[in-house]
Amino acid sequence: MSVEKPWLLHYPEQIPHELQFEDQTLHSILQQSAQQFSEKTAIHFLGKKRTYQQVYEEALKIADYLLSLGLKKGDRVSIMLPNCPQAVIAYYGVLFAGGIVVQTNPLYKERELEHLLKDSGADILITLDNLYPVASKMKALTNLKHIIITSIKDFLPFPKNMFYPFVQKKQEQFSIEITENESTHFFRSIMKRPIPNGPPNIEVDPFHDIAVLQYTGGTTGTPKAVMLSHCNILANIKQCVTWSYKLEKGKEKVLGLVPFFHVYGMMAIINLTISQGYEMILLPRFDAQTVLKTIDKEKPTIFPGVPTIYIALLNHPDIQQYDLSSIKSCLCGSAPLPVEVKQQFEKVTGGKLVEGFGLSETSPVTHSNLIWGLNKPGSIGCPWPGTEAAIYSEETGGFLEPYERGEIVVKGPQVMKGYWNNPEETAAVLRDGWLFTGDIGYMDKDGFFYIVDRKKDMIIAGGYNIYPREIEEILYEHEAIQEAVVIGVPDEYRGETVKAFVVLKDHVTITEKELDEYARSRLAPYKVPKIYEFRDELPKTAVGKILRRTLVDEEKTKA
């Protein structure tokens, strides 16, 4: 089925309607930038800078070492790191070695990490020293054979690297001794190895070979791995570069705050930055004061983010004390952008803040408002070059007219190959080349799209995708709980927050604090319910199915 493309009428003349994509690998962008911008700063991390040549050589060292451990083409390597230089070096090192990067959230607890390692089949994990206690347990639970350990201090400047262990011990109560052996390896030791003569001679098919497994909850709430090929990701990079046509290659600075394990952080910070010879200014965690100071001092020009980040900065009492005028462009993703936040942030910075839309399944961006052109607050914008989009009717099996509501479907070079080892789920969302997003929306006469609801029950809180079923399963494991259902409720700061409705077993009592402690021991912090409501019973259908939508509607009425 073909679609009309009214959005093309609103493209500025600088944006072509279609794009040609080169036959190259994802890691080749680092090699090219190292040649073109050899001595230019690639990474600025807490006061220490690394050039493109240094990052390239360090990535080759990782690749060489992974091959010495027995890595074969197509083997999976889990990278469980915050935003730090090691994450970028490891990412490209895995690709140079012919491996597949498995994006792993460093906030994961044992249960979550075990599932990811088993599902992906990764037998090498690259992570931080303070995560070693959790990581080391995986050797007995999964096929994990090797753990490569690094520390934040390894890439800090002097004297920060000297003081960091004391700060770490005080803040995190972390003082475990890790011994280097045949299955536990130190990142810093690999960095001391000789620089290889060049990249490994491994043939990679950019169109068919997978570069990244990106985990997402999908439609069922069960974590699945999205298979993104080299060309999927490269296509989205080129689309982004085309969309941001006023930005200058080799001259911009990107504030690297969105987590790398998030598909948006991977594209907008790691890959876009490296491909264009930009400088990435990395912050390992969000702190509003630190972000404001960093913008004032380092003058980043590009600031990818999520609504909660911009909201926190705008609400900081000292924001007027900082010069934020270096910001040219901010593409906001992962959650709806409130109109007032967009307007306030543009006023404060003088730059452009536009809302976009995408999924892990699309590498991730499919739509965005024009940075320099027609902009419709409240809309997710229009499709990027080379991308088709439409509103699909389940009833008729065809596409709908403007303003009619149905499921948003997309097609383009950035759409995934499918879900890893999951043909049933793949078939459910990929039909005749179209990706069924699960989001309900409509298109206006100009070809701008709007989201009005989600078919999925997914909660988006602070830019994180949270799947109720996973939390409910944890709650059901508690001996005091008879029934539980989790929903997202409106939250001015996070967009949504997690609320759990709980029915206790007869003659059993438990406090909200006790439930919170229980959930925190089993879930990443952002998944833990912020609100608990105890009820005698939950609304159900005639056959006993809990009516989640009834609870959602009740909360909307309250709000």
Image (spheres, helix red, strand yellow):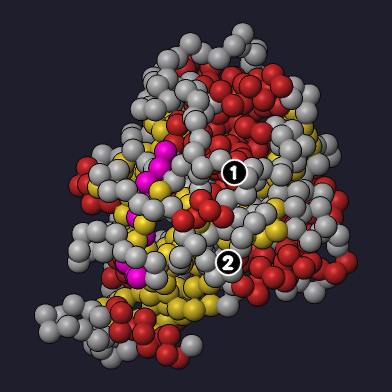
Distance CA(mark 2)–CA(mark 1): 18 Å
Q: Amino acid at mark 1?
A: Ile
Q: Secondary structure at mark 1?
A: loop
Mark 1 lies on residue: 15
Chief secondary structure of the magenta portion: strand
Q: Residue at x 59, y 72 (%)?
A: 338
> Can residue 317 be seen here?
yes
Quarter holding residue 432: top left
Q: Nearer the viewer, mark 2 or mark 1?
A: 1
Quarter holding residue 39: top right
Foreground pick, 519 / 497: 497
The x, y position of residue 131, in whole percent, is 53, 46
Identify the residue at the far left of this view: 543
Report the span colored magenta: 404-413
From what the image shows, is residue 185 above or below residue 369? Answer: above
Q: Secondary structure at mark 2?
A: loop
